[in-house]
Amino acid sequence: MQENVHTYVEDQEIKSGTKGIKKIVIPLLLVVILLGGGIGGYFYYMNTTYLKTDNAKVTAKSYSVKAVANGKLLFWDVEDGDLVEQDQVVGRQQALPYITSPINGTVIKNEGALNQVVAQGTELAVVADTSNFYINMNIEETDLMKIRLGQKAYVTLDGYKRKIFKGQITEISPATQTYFSGTGSFTTSGEYTKVTQYIPVKVSIENEENLPMVYGMNATVKIHLK
């Protein structure tokens, strides 16, 4: 009789312990399921609502200043960072018209030097329209159908991490990034390897605080798809 009582008590303790474990485990499982569902739902929402990339940089339209003929530079008067005006004389070659700036802008690259001998068409400088900076982002071709002109964009720059610049898509390139580069996708054995192409997209941004921009600054862009 005592043995049966003892066994009964043990059974009751086991059942009680099992119930206690269930009371703890089941709520935890529910929390994990809900948390997992919430995280999954968040990522689904973000992936279907936004397109994000850090393959982007600050840029501006730029123009080359070239030598007009073969010969020596008798005069050259610009350096990197100089502000120039359209048609401003920046150099001269012997017995030829003056070399002038094509636009109002900033010299972002200078290759010319006094008394340098150059060939016709040699790039002597690059002038950028730095009054109209924009973001050049590159998207994968598989994402092309997701974007369109006028979509809102949110931009952060590595130089201003706490600042979010508002913007919008104003131009989608009709050619891929490498189309005119002449690079192929063939291996040395002649086999073709398909490589995902990138499409340049122009994003205009608002800079109400007139924060200084530097040509080539890294940017992260988040496009609002809906």
Image (cartoon, rainbow, N blue to C red):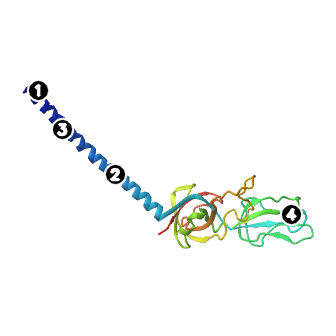
Q: Decide: few, some or many residues near mark 2? Use Cα within 10 Å; few <14, some 14-19, many ≥20.
A: few
Dot 1 or dot 2: first in sequence order is: 1
Label 3 belongs to which residue?
A: 15
Marks 2/4: CA–CA distance: 74 Å
Where is 163 relative to 27, above or below? below
Marks 1/4: CA–CA distance: 114 Å
Marks 3/2: CA–CA distance: 26 Å
Q: Secondary structure at mark 2?
A: helix
Which of labels 2 and 4 is toward the front?
2
Identify the residue shown where x is 54% and y is 64%.
209
Q: Secondary structure at mark 3?
A: helix
Dot 3 or dot 2: first in sequence order is: 3
In the foreground, 210 or 194: 194
**Would residue 160 be seen by someone viewing this image from the given angle?**
yes
Dot 4 or dot 3: first in sequence order is: 3
In the foreground, 149 or 193: 193
Label 1 belongs to which residue?
A: 3
Residue sitting farthest toward the right: 95
Amino acid residing under circle 3? Lys
In the foreground, 143 or 117: 143
Amino acid residing under circle 4? Phe
Residue 6 appears in which quarter of the rendering? top left
Label 2 belongs to which residue?
A: 33
Amino acid residing under circle 2? Ile
Dot 2 or dot 4: first in sequence order is: 2
Whole-percent x and y of residue 177?
Answer: 67, 63
